[in-house]
Each structure stands twice: as C-alpha cells, then as structure tokens.
C-alpha cells in the first residue's frame, strides 16, 4: 500500500477543505441566496473531503487490501453521484462543466481500479486522486475570482424611510 503517500495526501486534502470553507464564507450571502450555488459549493467541498476520506481509510488497515478497495469503490461512486447533477456555477463557463465531467469520469475510474485491485491499480488510483484534487482546486479558484450571476446575489437590504410629514399650516 502507499502508506507514505496517503499519510501526506489526507492532511493536504483536509487542509484544502478547510481553505474552501473559508472561501465559501467570503461569499456566504451569494451562496445562501442560491439553491443551485449552495449545492455547487457543497459539491466542490467533496472534491477535497472524499479524497481525504479515502486517504484516511487507506491507512486504517494497510494489511487488508479488501478494506480499502471496498471503501474506495463506495466513496468514489458517491462522489460521482453527487457531482453528476451539479451543472457548474450560475453563468458557468465551459471549463467548470468540463471539470465536473472529468471529475465524474475520474471517480468512476477510481472505483473500477479499486475493484480490480493490485499494486499497479493502487498507484494509478493515487495519481487519479491527485488529479481530482487539482481539478477541485481549479474550480475553487474560478469560484473565488469569477463574478456570479446577478440573480444568485442577494438583493441589497431595503432601508426604511421616514413617513411623509403632514403639510405645515399657517
């Protein structure tokens, strides 16, 4: 098993997840105002959380390959299922949608390779997980620096106005 890889990979993924949560907080009003955007930011969080979880599980019982194989298959299928309906950010660019499709394909490939098993498949899964993290980072970057659709943003709060004064009589 790739113990040293996953010992470094998991904390990196979970640190990226923490940074992503901070990034989402920076645009919390926009995220809360849009159900689609809220779902999308959750899907991006899974780009970091699921690979991190896979890495932690890979370290639980390194002597039992069936343990990590089954868990990788389950987690990868969950990742594909969650990302499949997420169609990019509002006013999304093709890059985002292409990255989503690529992520679904990567998750499915990870599931298939984990089901097959073997040392070569383990190494290939590690490479695919690294590519998945890279995609997640790029989607997160686009989220931070791309203006969102105006309909996804909250309306500015209305300030109350004073009632009109009655006319002054002489």
Image (spheres, rainbow, N blue to C red):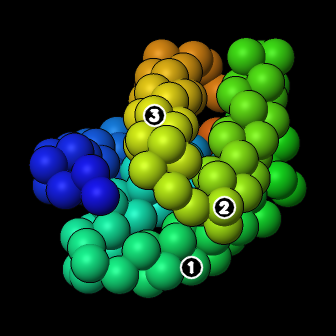
Q: Is residue 65 visible?
A: yes
**Mark identifier at residue 127:** 3
**Residue 51 position in % (x across, y down):** 43, 55
Viewer-nearest residue: 85 or 26 = 85
SS for dot 2: helix
Between disc 3 and disc 2, the foreground one is 2
* Crowdedness near tag 2: few (<14), some (14–19) or many (≥20) residues, C-alpha within 10 Å: few
SS for dot 3: helix
The quadrant of the rendering that contains the N terminus is bottom left
Q: Is residue 89 left or right of residue 66?
A: right
**Mark identifier at residue 70:** 1
The numbered mark, 1 or 3, whose residue comes first in the sequence reads 1
Residue ID at (67%, 41%): 106
Question: For mark 2, what is the residue?
Answer: 116
The numbered mark, 1 or 2, whose residue comes first in the sequence reads 1
Q: Is residue 38 visible?
A: no
Residue ID at (26%, 78%): 63
Mark 1–mark 3 distance (CA, rounded to whole Å): 18 Å
User: Where is residue 60, by image quadrant?
Assistant: bottom left
* Crowdedness near tag 1: few (<14), some (14–19) or many (≥20) residues, C-alpha within 10 Å: some
Residue ID at (66%, 61%): 116
Q: Count every numbered label the image shows and give the total.
A: 3
SS for dot 1: helix
Residue ID at (71%, 47%): 109
Viewer-nearest residue: 32 or 84 = 84
Q: Is residue 155 left or right of residue 121?
A: right
Between disc 1 and disc 2, the foreground one is 2
**Residue 96 position in % (x across, y down):** 71, 25
**Residue 23 position in % (x across, y down):** 34, 40
């Amino acid at each position: 098993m790739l113990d040293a890889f996953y010992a470094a990979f998991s904390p990196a993924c979970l640190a990226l997840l923490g940074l992503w949560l901070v990034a989402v907080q920076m645009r919390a009003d926009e995220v809360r105002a849009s159900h689609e955007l809220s779902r999308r930011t959750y899907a991006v969080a899974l780009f970091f959380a699921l690979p991190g979880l896979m890495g932690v599980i890979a370290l639980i019982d390194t002597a039992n390959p069936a343990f990590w194989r089954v868990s990788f298959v389950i987690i990868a299928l969950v990742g594909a299922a969650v990302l499949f309906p997420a169609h990019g950010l509002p006013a999304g660019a093709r890059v985002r949608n292409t990255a989503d499709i690529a992520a679904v394909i990567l998750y499915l490939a990870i599931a298939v390779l984990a089901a097959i098993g073997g040392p070569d498949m383990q190494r290939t899964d590690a490479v695919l997980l690294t590519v998945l993290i890279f995609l997640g980072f790029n989607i997160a970057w686009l989220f931070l620096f791309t203006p969102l659709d105006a309909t996804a943003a909250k309306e500015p709060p209305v300030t109350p106005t004073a009632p009109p004064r009655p006319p002054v009589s002489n």
